[in-house]
Image (cartoon, rainbow, N blue to C red):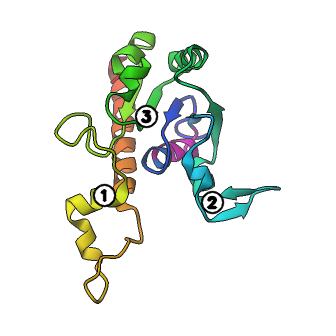
Amino acid sequence: MGKLSGITVVDLTQFLPGPMMTVMMADHGAEVIKVEPAAGDPARDQAPFADYGGAPHSVWFANLNRGKQSLVLDLKSEGGKAQLRELIARADVLVEGFRPGVMARLGFDYEAAKAINPAIIYCSISAFGQHGALAHHPAHDMAVQALAGFLSVNDGPDGTPVVPGAPSADMAAGLTALSAVLMALIGRDRTGEGA
């Protein structure tokens, strides 16, 4: 039995930071319910592909989503919203990776989730945080590394920029999110309050 058995996580994330965070929780026994749009997490279509029991699947997607239950919900439909409300009501953790404001437009920002489940731990992962000048700009790993100046340490021998071998900004975001959620779970155990 894992250290996180009995913890239920609703995962609304895609690509790398959120799925990396929630797969570590799943690896330690948490029940992780990955909510995907009808088209699925775009990582499902990312090469390389390998045969996992009869059909080729993305290695990237498989590695970041092992041990999770997948559920397709249309969060713009009333039926999809009702199902998400039911998931939130029984969840310990809700993780989302949308740009700031999206969850509010869908009706599931922190205040709305807290009204459904006062003990919920709510984690938002975005490129530039929830507030500030860049908050509403979309970005993934390489853009964040470039803005931080980190890409310059990866120049080739001729001084030409190269694609980094590891998505360190996305990985750091996943680890930071995991740390925050685990600390919030410890805090909830002591106070009974979500965060």
Q: What residue is shown with label 1?
A: 143
Q: What residue is shown with label 3?
A: 96
| Residue 6: image location, x then y, percent | 57, 28
| Secondary structure category for the residue under label 2 | helix
In this view, the residue in front, 59 or 134, is 134
Please say if 45 is above or below 99.
below
Q: Amino acid at mark 3?
A: Glu
| Secondary structure category for the residue under label 1 | helix
Report if the CB atoms under discs 3 and 1 are less than 8 Å apart: no
Q: Where are the magenta residues, as a range?
A: 21-29
Q: Residue furthest top?
A: 115
The answer to if 26 sits in the magenta stretch is yes
Separation of marks 2 and 1 at Cα, in angstroms? 24 Å
Seen at 58% across and 34% down, the residue is: 37
| Residue 12: image location, x then y, percent | 50, 34
Separation of marks 3 and 2 at Cα, in angstroms? 22 Å
Neighbor class of circle 1 (other Cα within 10 Å; few <14, some 14-19, many 20+) is some
| Residue 159: image location, x then y, percent | 25, 84
Q: Amino acid at mark 2?
A: Val
Name the quarter where the C terminus is drawn. Answer: top left
- 129 sits left or right of 16 in the view: left
| Residue 94: image location, x then y, percent | 45, 29
In this view, the residue in front, 77 or 97, is 77
Q: In the figure, residue 79 lies in which quadrant?
A: top right
- Looking at marks 3 and 1 on the same chain, the residue that comes earlier in the sequence is marked by 3
| Secondary structure category for the residue under label 3 | strand
Report if the CB atoms under discs 3 and 2 are less than 8 Å apart: no
Seen at 28% across and 43% down, the residue is: 137
Seen at 50% across and 44% down, the residue is: 14
